[in-house]
Amino acid sequence: MNHPLRFCWPLLLLAGGAAQAEYRVAFMPDIHFHDVYGQFADGAFPGLKNAKTGEQAIIRTMYAQLTSTRLFNENYFALRAALDDAGQKGIKWVALPGDFSDDGQPYHVRGLVTLLHEYQQKYGMRFFATPGNHDPNRPFTVPGGEEDFLGEGGKTQRIFSRGAKECKGYQGATVVIKTDAELPTICSEEMASSGYQAIMAAMGSYGINPSPEDRYWETPYSRYGTENYTWQAALKASDFSQRQYEICAQGTGGKYKKPGYDPCFQVADSSYLVEPVPGLWLLAVDANVYLPTTTADPASPASGANFAGSGDAGYNKMLTHKQQTVAWMTDVAQRANRLNKTLITFSHFPMVEFDNGAAADLEAIFGKGKFQLARAPQEDTSHALAKTGIGVHVGGHMHFNDTGVRRYPDGSQLFNIQAPSMAAYVPAYKILSFKNRDEIDVQTVTLKNVPRFDELFEHYQQEWDHLNATHSPHLWNKAILKAENYYAFTNWHITELTRLRFLPEEWPENIRQMLFTLNGEEMLILSQLADGQGFDKHSAAWKAAQQKADALAKSAEMTRSDFARWNGFDLAVDFYRLRNADALALKDIDAARLKQYQLLTRALAARLSPVEAQINPQSPFEEIFRVRFGSIFKVIDKYLHGNPSGDFHINLKTGEIVPVE
């Protein structure tokens, strides 16, 4: 299917042309690293012995994975595959734009540091990390843990740190507490969610602190410049005590503080600018904003309970609660231009909305607060970020593959590259190759064949057998264990995630019932059904609509029976495939089905009016279908007509973005 979003690998890069690039940087956000074969320092949980390796595997259940937007276990193998791929391509600089850990738990962070050190030695790589909302969960350490580790006999194992769930009053290194759960709860401090001080100390070698080999390094709070730079000055500026700012419930503190701001706290900001080699500036923005809660206790400033999580805050709150960092970004961009530096900015959160302008449609269909719409930057936020002058930003957080472009009348522009997660569908990472300061080639590398991706399947089989024997409502489709490669495994993940979580939680009941009732042929007929005729397949009105559907399909060189090959569930899965992966999803959706979706988009749009959009639960079946499904197909069409998001070329001087074929 010829489509503006489908394009091939850039021949220049495959032919080795990337070696001519001045700089090449790989971006791998949302690793959510889980140390599958690590060991609890206190020995609290040994894990499950793996027959293939002989090692003890500490993993989450398959059900937990299939009801989460990220895989917890297999990304252990995917990260290794991605780093090996990047290393074999000669990549020396790898950026980690947040959520590099799974909730900042000591066990996982320790394992990640060990792995990154291994790849430093193997390929001579340097890593540059900036935190996401999962590392840390709060500015200060808070109790943590999970209720869905996989235990013996396929049963669920609960593990928490002191203060979480039933592990509230225990003393000592570890303890086992009996509850009504299948297995006794294990209490271990390995499950605590570390705060900034612990995370920054552990990950300090990966950009967060300066290295003697850096040409330059600074923070928003350092006071030297490029002319007066010394490593000793940078080392002093990197101290945790020198990287604090004041945040209040109402906005930024410090020199931005306004009368009445209260309560206020000192928290850390791990942002930094580094020049690892002459001419390349990597601007790592810590875009976490942890708002003080209304019940915050100034008498206990280091309590994580004083703060909300940062998952929905993002850059909307950066502009109001972290103004000093945004001002610093502007200053860095201006200096990069003056000093002729190649600047690339990365952080965890997106700077441009990620639904191709479909947010209003999604809210109308699914309701306010659904579909993670709160995480989208507002348009004035994107404009403010464009005015900083950074030009290009690489983000994560959503686990989406997407490209957002903004050009404003004042001449400011912003290219926001959403790099996908290797722990979700489609598993991939991005490589940015800089020909010069203004020209960037972006390559999206999909992970298909990941060695050892099925190494843990024996444990999942035990889980499935146990769930099946106990008639558990958490039974998942064991066909996922037949996946031939990691890519197919993630395709199963998005399919089961749609069935087990997205449809029950996000789709209104009346739309969900239609999904499980209708196939594509019936949707085509309903698009032609006269008003007020009802859903009666034996009526004359239905037969008349069938004839109209036949004629409509024939005009597009299709047949009505072609539409019968897919159903509402297939539509829902494709919806999420496109939202997650954009152009990368096209290989998994039949080209003929995409054409049928486009025909339905046009057919339903032709019959939709502003008056008809006002429906309620008492509205006739066919009217609800026409309005709601008309909007669903409209959103799909918007996903199909976004900016290039696979392999493309950006020219900052001309403002152009073009696919590379």
Image (cartoon, rainbow, N blue to C red):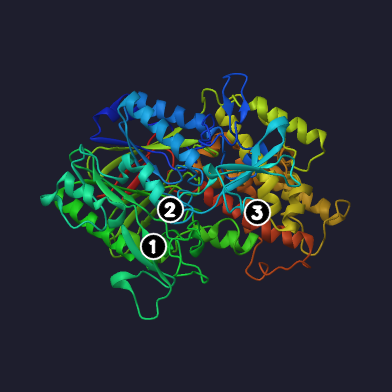
Q: Which mark is residue 349?
A: 2
Q: Secondary structure at mark 2?
A: loop
Image vertical order of residue 629 relative to residue 209, above or below: below
Q: Locate residue 467, reporting x and y percent.
A: 77, 36
- Specify which label sits upstream in the sequence, 1 or 3: 1
Q: Amino acid at mark 2?
A: Phe
Between the C-alphas of marks 1 and 3, the distance is 43 Å
The answer to whether any part of residue 106 appears in the image is yes
For the question of whether residue 11 can be seen, the reply is no
**Res 603 label:** 3
Read off the residue under disc 1: 318
Q: Are marks 2 and 1 in contact (CB under 8 Å)?
A: yes
Mark 1 element type: helix
In the rendered structure, find residue 522 and report the number of the disc placed on it. none
Quarter occupied by the C terminus: top left
Q: Earlier in the sequence, mark 2 or mark 1?
A: 1
Looking at this view, is 173 or 226 the one in front? 173
Question: Could you tell me how far apart the alpha carbons at marks 2 and 1 are, in whole angstroms?
Answer: 10 Å
